[in-house]
Amino acid sequence: MRRYARLFMLLCRVSLMRQMAYRPHFFLMIFGKVIRMVLLLFFFQAVFLKVDRLGQWTFDQVLLLFATFHLVDYVMSITFQRNLSYHLPTLIQSGNLDSRMTLPINSLFMASLENIDMMDFISFIPCLGLLVYALHRLGFAFTWLQALTYGLLIVNALIFLFAVVLIIATISFWTTQSAGLARVFDDLTRVGRYPLDIFEGFWKFFSSMSCPWR
Amino acid sequence: MPMMRKALFIFRLAFIERSAYRVNFILEISGGILSILIVVFLWLAVYRSSGRAELGGYSLAEMITYLLGGGLINSFLLTTAENPETSRAIQDGTLSNLLIQPINPYWVWLLRDLAGKAFLGVIGLAGYAIVALFLNERLVFLFDPLRLILFGVALAAAVLLQFLTFESLNLLAFWVENTYGFRFTMRVIMEVAGGAIIPLTFFPDLLQKVFALLPFPYLVYFPMRIYLNKIEFAEILPELVRAAAWMAGLAGLNAILWKRGLRQYTSMGD
């Protein structure tokens, strides 16, 4: 276990060095990612300029949902998502996966964490700030048990998402491309950004059953 | 005439190349449609919660039409069409091969970009047509031929504006090693400031004023305003002139970057 923790730290360092090789690109990407989140927040604000509630949800509650969604999304994209969805199919197609398989470490560990996205890691900090801000607006009204349940559910979501992303990525062992399917999944996960109350009838049932990661 | 033949040949070739992984593209466009459908559901809920027939000057039918139309334009304009070929050719030196060919590489990139957009447009149109079938009672259809023509002109301007904007960032590859950061940031800003997510009237006044200073509203917001009859005929022409001025300015910038870049371009190899 300690060996893998050390290896993970090493992969983080190598990824940072590789991504920092193009510094303007590195900082522009962070800027772009933060801007994207801010603009999405403007979008929600624009919605709530017109209504007080979305179903049962107030703006502060939607803010907390938005921050939680991005918390999970960021952890996923910093670690396994791009490695499995886009990098693994490329390795399979180019035949470079062979060299990874001969390494004296778990192949799945390497395939999932070879490139740690340090740009996302840095742009994750404002997301944490947003989470704290949303909790502050809600008056930090939660018990320790609720906080523990929240943490456990986030871990549960990450395990579930890892499994789905891995299933999609491994399709590329048989096909030449799986990026399109990975993108569909990316778009499907975005359902989690919105309260379930936006759907009605069949679509409410469908979205809760077809997107259980929400 | 031989020039026209060459252009058509490049266009056809790029179109065929794109079709090689068509299932992949269909899936990518489907993802985009899915995102738009979720936003449609969101706005249905917003109109339901507000209990009003009109929000931000848009009725529910107009809003759904805007979201689907904007989504369609977005699918071939912004989603995957950033034309990274230019910066790649400069960075890996394949520009040298293009420079000795009897056609200016800049036109090759433009034609390939147009072909890519045409391909994505065709797939997007098919996908959105299916969605429109289910939502047709909630959609606004345009029957005025003059407005349809102006909508087409605005769309053509949007296609060129998008190409020229990204091309000026791509040409920075003569000086910087990686242009993806520039293009990514530009795409993020473009999507929001262009009105691809919601009509710009929904944003606070200050943001609307800032967005109006940029060329991006001509990408989605302006064509959709023409389609939805949200702009008078008398206002359309001055807006088109402004869009043309932006295009001329960006084309000038592209020409300067191309000339100066070529002056210092070197490629090495065996």
Image (cartoon, rainbow, N blue to C red):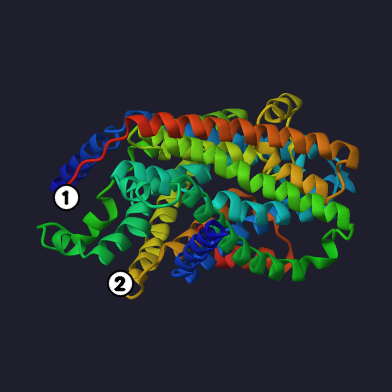
The residue at which mark 1 appears reads as A1
At 82% from the left edge and 60% from the top edge, which residue is drawn? B139
Q: Is residue A27 left or right of residue B43?
A: left
Residue A98 versus residue A59 in the image, above or below: below
At 90% from the left edge and 48% from the top edge, which residue is drawn? B53
Disc number lying in front (2 or 1): 2
Residue B165 visible in the displayed image: yes
Q: Amino acid at mark 2?
A: Phe
Tag 1, which secondary structure?
A: loop
Q: How many marks?
A: 2
Q: Choose between B16 and B61: the one closer to the eye.
A: B16
Quadrant of residue B1 in the image? bottom right
At 57% from the left edge and 56% from the top edge, which residue is drawn? B117
- Percent across and percent down for residue B81 are 52, 51
- Percent across and percent down for residue B114 are 56, 55
State which chain disc 1 sits on. A
Q: Amino acid at mark 1?
A: Met
- Percent across and percent down for residue B249 are 61, 30
Tag 2, which secondary structure?
A: helix
Q: Which mark is residue A173?
A: 2
Crowd rating for badge 1 (residues with CA inside 10 Å; few <14, some 14–19, many 20+): few
Q: Choose between B234 and B26: the one closer to the eye.
A: B234
